[in-house]
Amino acid sequence: MTSDLYKLTVSEARARLRARDVSSAELTRACFDRIAAVDPRLHAYLTLCEREALAQAEDADRRLGAGQAPALCGIPLAIKDIFATREIRTTCASRILENFVPPFDATVIAKLRADGAVFLGKTNMDEFAMGSSTENSAFGPTVNPYDLGRVAGGSSGGSAAAVAADECLAALGTDTGGSIREPASFCGVIGIKPTYSRVSRYGVVAYASSLDQVGPFAKTVRDAAIMLRALAGVDPHDSTCADRPVPDYEQSLTGEVKSLRLGVPKEFFVEGMEREVEDAIRAALKQLEAMGARAVEISLPHTEYAIGAYYLIATAEASANLARYDGIRYGLRAEAATLAEVYNLSRAQGFGAEVKRRIMLGTFALSTGYYDAYYLKAQKVRTLIRRDFEQAFEHCDVIVTPTAPTTAFKLGEKTADPLQMYLSDIFTISVNLAGLPGLVVPCGYDSLNLPIGLQLIGAPFGEETILRAGDACERSGAFTRRPPLV
Amino acid sequence: MTATEKYEAVIGLEVHTHLLTRSKIFCGCSTGFGAPPNHNVCPVCMGMPGVLPVFNRRVLDLAIRAGLAAHCEIAAHSIFARKNYFYPDLPKGYQISQYELPLCKGGYVELPAADGETPRRVNLVRIHLEEDAGKNLHGVDSSLVDFNRSGVPLLEIVSEPDIRSPEEAGAYLRELRLMLRYLEVSNANMEEGSFRCDANVSVRIRGATELGVKTEVKNMNSFKNVEKAIAHEIERQIEVLESGGRVVQETHLWDPDREETRPMRSKEYAHDYRYFPEPDLPPLKAPRELVDEIRAAIPELPAARRARYIRDFGLTHYETDVLTQERDLSDYFEEVIKAPGLSNRKAAANWVMTEVLRVVRESVKPIAEAAARGRGRRAARYGRNGRHQPERRQDRVRCDVQVGQGRGGHRGRTRIGPGLGPGRDRSGLR
């Protein structure tokens, strides 16, 4: 049925497009119909690109007709509004960039364009990627497709919700402290944050330069593997991007987990976690063991310092990265009489509260007299955290943990106390500090029908291993995927 | 006791000089001078959201060359750092520079000495790399910003406070400029903005060891102005101290029209730069092999050349100074004295210093081009014990030797006048 085409996975759509059983134009239109039907309630999208998307779909159909089209040719995708998309508004969900139209594409966008992918639109996020619920968007939150009164997670909430609600076949997000993995967990979809440097950051509006990483949201692990292959690879525009060959990640989805050593960090199973979340994670572990994997208890002793280290390093880098929003060359410029006022008023009006909070925190951490005690110290802690993981990976192949301490919380529940909100990242944040890859796969639902995500952490450039483990989880049929409310 | 007898001036200079690369330091935009505003720009040097710097390796070669010539220690491993402050000509709101681990440390510049004196050395603290900012153009009721210059590679050369007089400061700057031009590392042209200087000036009672409070003097756009500004500042500080006051640590701007310094509103420059290592760039490596390769290719420097002229040709300090003021000129002079049969080097030197230089100045062309054409004929005429010889074919061939590497080419040409047209006096040229 044409009307159900939006429910396809990337893998299914690829097959049908190549068989010319369905056209990209049909697929794209089906997605836009779906968006029209559900997005008024979800608010996953900030900008829709119908004209451009249909033009891309037409081009894709021509290529598909000629044969030998890339994997993502004709596949409709949603793009987090943090990626520079040429001639398409890119806001980072901030008033300061509300009308900013970049004259260039991010490298990953250019890659997807070259592959013939279709961009449905730009999705909602926490402003400048700072948040864990998408409630920090200047344009209103995105809600959870499993409960419209709850958050979709953040900062890539829009992309996660769009995939969960079949408003696209897959989506792009970014992850600095958990911003792909946590919303993936809350929305019951697949999300992967690759190893730092695996994917180019050029054209991705910077939050924290040494932590930011691009990754896909998808409906299946196979889809995530397909997406990752298209995104990864060296980029001459990004000096921090690794020059390493990109494996065909699909090939690693063998379903085999026999003798895979699963590290279970004792510091991650502590008080404060929802009972049902912990149960679901343990059940998933049991399932993997039943398939031949072996659970091993490990220790990541410096885990308790991760949040502190993160909120010094990330905010410090952010305070510099966001200095360019000054009203001078682009973005919001307040009417003012003096230069100082242009700066002060543009930024006061343009930035939301959380962004301001983090800029101040970061500026303080770098300031004279405090640099050593805060920023430098945090970097040293970071080294210790990385070493914890290095040592752990001598005894295991994949580290298995919960993604978040809770399922999706209610809108407004954590906004009163920023620190409470920060604690949502407790299981994801150390992965960014260590630069490791992390995959989230849904592993169950709680009694309120809210999704629970299992996190699989790999060694550096160990995406193949975690994808294999995640795929095995998915295939095990240990739980059935439930449709969202919309 | 006069003020100058009682007080000693202590001066340190910070020089910023543009490196002669075709492209900017962190993007592929052209560094060419004179383009229309915001023409040589791209998302990277405009600081657009999401952009990243990529280091232009040619910059490293030139920087190492300069560092070696200044006898610095070249760090095998140095780090870029962000220097954070807000100003309209700084697109990212931070400048990528170097802080804790610069490319070069130590080193010195030897000042040319007068006859009979030992050359003075001005020691350097460090030399490091950074990117330039754009340029503000202030109008009556608005300001404009041109980002052509944003991202042009700069070498920052910091001297120790070893300089003791405005004249010495001038000598240091002139020698530095000469060295950079010989190395073809920079055009070092103050008027074009490819050579900028800030001075740190303080005074103390002669014989004291502690440094006095220093002020920073900026906005001097010529060597003469640097000397004047420093002289003025020394005088001002002495006056302050003599009248029982205290020198305030602040920045002063030189006003070339009024010929005085005025303090900058201190709020503007009360900066905490919050330096931290640049996370978007890997550490800068300068391996031993590269440094050795560059060292081997360094041309003879002005100081060595002057010494050689004095020793081998018996020229005076004045004569060698004039002959070595441009590398091309002294290269030309050396070619002249190599001419077979030429015995009177003094006369040759004199001829180059007067006749050739006159023609060069008149034609307003780079020395290389102007002199090369006349070279063969003159050498033939004067070189053979005064007897006139017809121009030999091989002399003419030798004339066409390309001497003006890069300088007359794409980068930073010395100002070229209306050029030679029909009817101009071509007596000195072929």
Image (cartoon, grey):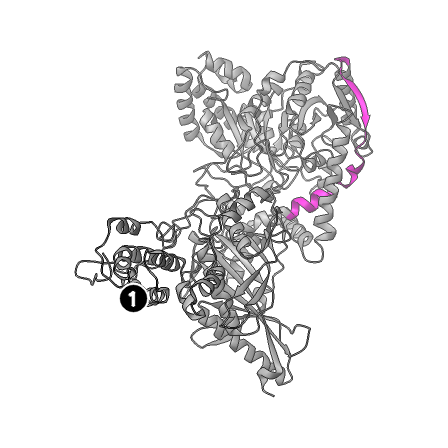
- Looking at this rendering, what residue extends furthest in the bottom direction? B1
Q: How many marks?
A: 1
Residue A311 within the segment the image draws in magenta: yes
Q: Chain of mark 1?
A: B
Callout 1 crowding tier (Cα within 10 Å): few <14, some 14–19, many ≥20: few
Q: Residue at x 27, y 59 (%)?
A: B378
Q: Quadrant of the C terminus of chain A?
A: top right
* Residue B208 in the image, given as x and y percentages of width and height: 68, 77
Q: Quadrant of residue B138?
A: bottom left
Q: Is residue B287 magenta?
A: no
Q: Is residue A234 above or below residue B316?
A: above
Q: Is residue B29 left or right of residue A361?
A: left
A426 relative to A38, above or below: below
Residue A200 location (% of width, % of height): 55, 34
The amino acid on which the numbered mark 1 sits, given as a three-letter code, is Glu
**Region of the chain picked out in magenta, as a range:** A290-316
Q: Work out whether residue A271 or residue B164 is closer to the camera in this orientation and state it.
A: B164
Viewer-proximal residue among B376 and B268: B376
For residue B135, which quarter of the picture? Answer: bottom left
Q: Residue A126 at x, y = what percent?
A: 60, 40
Main secondary structure of the magenta stretch: helix
In this rendering, the answer to whether B151 lies above or below A11 is: below
Q: Is residue A480 visible?
A: no
Residue B240 horizontal/vertical position (percent): 60, 81
Which of A142/B273 is in front?
B273
Q: From the image, tell me which residue sits under label 1.
A: B355
In this picture, is A469 found above or below A272? above
Residue B225 shows up from this direction = yes
Q: Secondary structure at mark 1?
A: helix
A31 left or right of A429 in image: left
